[in-house]
Image (tube, helix red, strand yellow):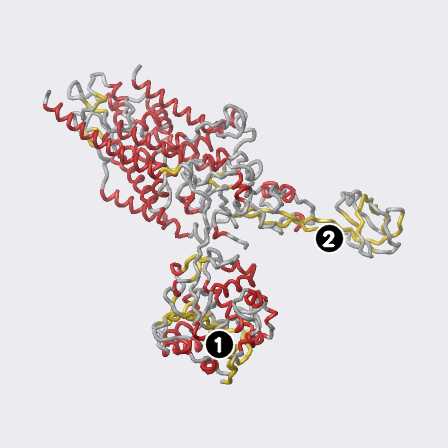
Amino acid sequence: MPADDRLSRREFLGRAVKAGASLAVAGAVGWAAWDPAGPGPSESGPQATALPDFSVSTAGPRMSIARGADRVRNLQAALRAAGGIERFVRRGDRVVLKVNAAFASPPMLSATTHPDIVHELARLCVAAGAASVVVTDNPINDPASSFALTGIGEAARRAGAEVVLPEERLFRPLTVKDATLIRNWPVLVGPLAGATRLIGVAPVKDHHRSGASMSMKNWYGLLGGRRNIFHQDIQTIITELAAMVTPTLVVLDGTTTMMTNGPTGGSLADLKETGTLIVGTDQVAVDACGAALLGKTPSDLPFIAKAAALGIGTADYRSLAPVEVSA
Amino acid sequence: MKIRTARRASQIFFVALLVWFCVVSTLGDRFWQLRGWPVNWLLDLDPLAGLATLLSTRTLYSGLLWGLATVGLTILLGRVFCGWLCPFGAMHQFVGWLGRRRRKMKERVEANRYRPAQRIKYYILAAFLAAAALAPFGAGTLLIGLLDPLPLVYRSISLVVVPLADRLAGPVISPIPRFYEGAGLIAVVFGTALALNLWVPRFYCRFVCPLGALLGVLGRFALRRIGRTGEGCTGCLKCERNCEGACRPTGRIRISECVMCVNCLDDCAHGAIAYGTRPSAEGETLSPDLRRRGFILSTAAGLVAAPALRLGASTGPNWDPDLIRPPGSLAEEEFLARCIKCGQCMRVCPTNVIHPAGLESGLEGLWTPRLNFRIGTSGCQHTCIACGHLCPTAAIRPLSLDERRGSGSFAARGPVRVGTAFVDRGRCLPWAMDKPCIVCQENCPVSPKAIFTREVFTPVRGAASLTVARIEHRRFVLAGAAMGSERFGTGDYYALLPDGTRLRIAANGPDWIETDRAPAAAPGATLAVLIRLQQPVVDPRHCIGCGVCEHECPVLGRRAIRVSAENESREPHHRMVL
């Protein structure tokens, strides 16, 4: 056999081995990845996740109403009457303040939580020994602009709190138990991860669709996605939001109330000095009390009765014997 | 028999098979219509479709497993697929042969010399595969369908050649001539690809074809190959006269370019070309002639392709509501990771409502299926699931009838919705023009109907205030009226009496109105002629977006009821109502 024939044979064998190996790899990959049926219907299996319960069992049901023209003093007085911030925030707590920063409008228009309230509450939490205070919301207007123009961002940072803007990665799909609307819906859970306390801080506002925007409606700002689809059933979504969040405390600032053209307002003529700030552990009771500031009764606002029926709180706030103080 | 004859027979067979498959993708009960023919088989054999969707979805769907046969054939024998099976390759070869058969030997050898530009096809392949590989991470897209020869030739035959031939012949294949929006561009691409063979033979195969590139890479270990034997060669170059791959059999042969046309075997008069296991006497170049820079550049281009194409948010908030996908289509990003733009859904659609898209879904969505309800015979039939069962990549899932209609075990889920119909109240005849119509409501095929009507009675212009002169039995004789005779006798008109009763008008003359009951009014009373209108309203809970209403709407230009993609099942983000 000539030398080049042997060479040729060796080369052929090498080639055959490589070809065989390629065949084996291609066949194995193809077979392993073979999907004879194709994709099925997209499964939107609801995640059974729930938000943690942020209530403080040792604090008991608390509610207080402070009256006065100065909102910061109202807040201080109401918290004192409710047992002091220390009753709700302890050393080492990681506190989240869910403010209403929905619109990029200045504080004087009262469409958003007043920065003075944010500052004072954050300061009190820090003073009570909170390890961290996070201020967050998913505004309707551009988030950065909203936190800037409302003054909330600056006020929070000045008090030693951190502002968390609603980045996409901070949302997770969430399903509220027995809910019909909040099913597999993106919720701003990122800032709540690791938090031990959650305080809702909302202004009292007229809301053209639902009747009022107060503590319960304030949780709308935790929703992501095209959440305005829920305006088709606003009373139910507010009720489900209240069912979704069990806060440590809610602060409802009715020192100034937006009486008309809510929730954006836009004119000082929409505002009225109502000189009241309510603090409580029961968001339903707090909103039931706040309704009066809008010249309404709790029965004008169906979400209050719906939430009460679900046992989220009581519509009869007087049964909680709220402490009323003048600031 | 010469081996070249065998090759030609094979090519003719596969071209005929392709045309047959395209023709029989027709709804009907004749032997030449849908009778279980494996009409996707040539697409299934395309390992580029298999590999690219494997990268983009991590699965190999159904018939695409056939691609392994081509892979195996290529690994063992080289690019036999290109030279013997590929119908597009056969067409190129035929056109090239037509254009060159009288040319001089020297010219023909020159046309078949290797050109460095032949590496471009590998760059195209690299870019396409890179783009596909990112799809599972949400940053990729499937682009192969643009240039992959099998989807290209399928859609060209199905959407251009068959409809044109059918028009010339009769029609015989489709009783109503088929239209395809956007087919012009497909024709231009197809025609250009074929015409380029007059410049360089197998232009597409040599420079463009990403499938040829893939097979060129796979064929490097082929056991038997074309090559020069050590003896006999006189350097006459006859072997390069008809060399389809431009692989240079006289010199150091480029194995990755050889399409196994075997012309050199038959053309060599000196027995100097052999098909065997021994390497070519002049040596072999196994790997494609790539430049590192070109390879990196094209791969990088593929990697950024989808993110760059989607900067316009076409799959995000800027989605096009006019892009209505066939029922069963996956959510847009998953859809774009699968669709190879082969046109099978468009070919089979019995009502001819599926069309190759333009740029509604961006450049990457060119020639993907889109419903156009103005064309075709009757919207998207809600009892039809043909497209998903033909789709070779499950970009349109194969639905069961139950799933499509939301019956049986799918009752809780409801029917598959492709969009929602919206009444354009400024164009709708009963809404805007006081004309009775409701063709849309009558044709709404779902049960309960998604279109219901509101009944209103509106005074007729010029007959809103008529004074009764006297009453004769059921007839009002009117003072000073001059109406068109029989204008109000259609059954849609009513006389409104002062006491609020409405009597249907049975007939009228220039100055009288006859009603269907004896009127209770006195001379001197004023009455109005009303027209009864039924104004259509869409109930989004029941509308599936089938477009029958849009198809039937008598406002033929811009229809007065139109479907857009809101509320389509495949994209939860497009939900419009709770």
Q: In the image, which is nearer the foreground, mark 1 or mark 2?
A: 1
Q: Is B209 displayed left or right of B516 in the figure?
A: left
Image coordinates for residue B274, horizontal then vertical, percent: 22, 21
- Label 2: which residue? B458
Image coordinates for residue A9, horizontal then vertical, percent: 16, 25
Inspect the image, locate mark 1, and give the three-letter code of the amino acid beneath it. Arg
Question: Closer to the camera, A81 or A228?
Answer: A81
Count of number-bearing discs: 2
- Tell me, for residue A138, which label it has, or none: none
Residue A289's place in the image compared with B362, above or below, is: below
Residue A184's place in the image compared with A107, above or below, is: above
Q: CA distance from mark 1 to mark 2?
A: 61 Å
Assess whether mark 2 and mark 1 are in contact (beta carbons under 8 angstroms).
no
Label 1 marks a residue whose chain is: A
Q: Is B356 displayed left or right of B480 in the figure?
A: left
Furthest-top residue in this view = B1
Image coordinates for residue A49, horizontal then vertical, percent: 43, 58
Question: Closer to the camera, B202 or B405?
Answer: B405
- Tell me, for residue A62, which label it has, or none: 1
Inspect the image, locate mark 2, and give the three-letter code of the amino acid beneath it. Thr
Question: Closer to the camera, B145 or B512?
Answer: B145
Q: In terms of image quadrants, where is residue A56?
A: bottom left
